[in-house]
Image (cartoon, rainbow, N blue to C red):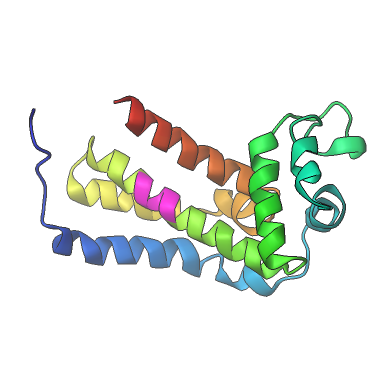
Amino acid sequence: MDQIKGPPPLRLAPPALLLVLLAVAGFLPAIVNRPISDDMLLVESRLALDGVSSFATFFRENYWGEWNPGGTYRPLSLCLLGLQKLVFGMNLGGYRVVSLLLHAVCTLLVWHILGRMLRAGSALFGAALFACHPIHAECVITVYGQIDLWSALFFWLFRRISE
């Protein structure tokens, strides 16, 4: 079996740090912002937790529950947000820190994927563009937007496992 060749880990640290800073810096002010869109509805009402039975309802109902009966089915996302509610309560800043960290990890994954297809400089540029592109604003600064970040992360993990 061939070993993966590449630069020593210490040579990867400065570009990785740059990408993490780019991913976080642009969205950092959002941590202290007021609730956006449906964040409070989701955290206060949909994630009203009263024990393990609440987590079981996430597997029986759609994402928005009674507010949108024809909505999407995303029980894993609700469980991940429910675990965050146990930790952060109503402090939306905590959820946004998790979103920022997920976005930074996704940026590093994009760099890794591009690095397998492009030259190092091009891969770094592409990942930097991904890190700070404003199209990611909704999924990074809203609580309900974490769905996209978790989906990207799990997609990559399952793809790596299947290789």
The reply to whether the magenta stretch includes residue 4 is no
The stretch drawn in magenta includes residue 107:
yes
Location of residue 151 in the rendering, given as x and y in whole percent from the top left corner: 54, 38
Choose between 5 and 14: the one closer to the eye.
Answer: 5
* 29 in relation to 7, above or below: below
- In this rendering, would 156 be left or right of 137? left
- The residue at 80%/36% (across/down) is 57
Q: Where is residue 73 in the image (x, y as percent from the top left)?
A: 73, 29
Question: Which residue is situated farthest in the front direction here?
Answer: 52
Left or right side of 12 for 101:
right
Q: Quadrant of the C terminus?
A: top left
| Above or below: residue 147 compared with residue 128 | above
Q: Main secondary structure of the magenta part?
A: helix
Query: What is the count of numbered marks?
Result: 0
In which quadrant of the rendered image does the N terminus lie? top left
x then y, percent, for residue 105: 42, 53
Q: Residue at x 69, y 66 (%)?
A: 88
In the image, which residues are magenta? 105-109
Q: In which quarter of the image is residue 116?
A: top left
Q: Residue furthest right?
A: 66
**60 displayed left or right of 101:** right
Q: In this view, does 100 lie to the left or right of 9?
A: right
Q: Can you give x and y, in whole percent of width and height, for residue 52 in the image? A: 75, 46
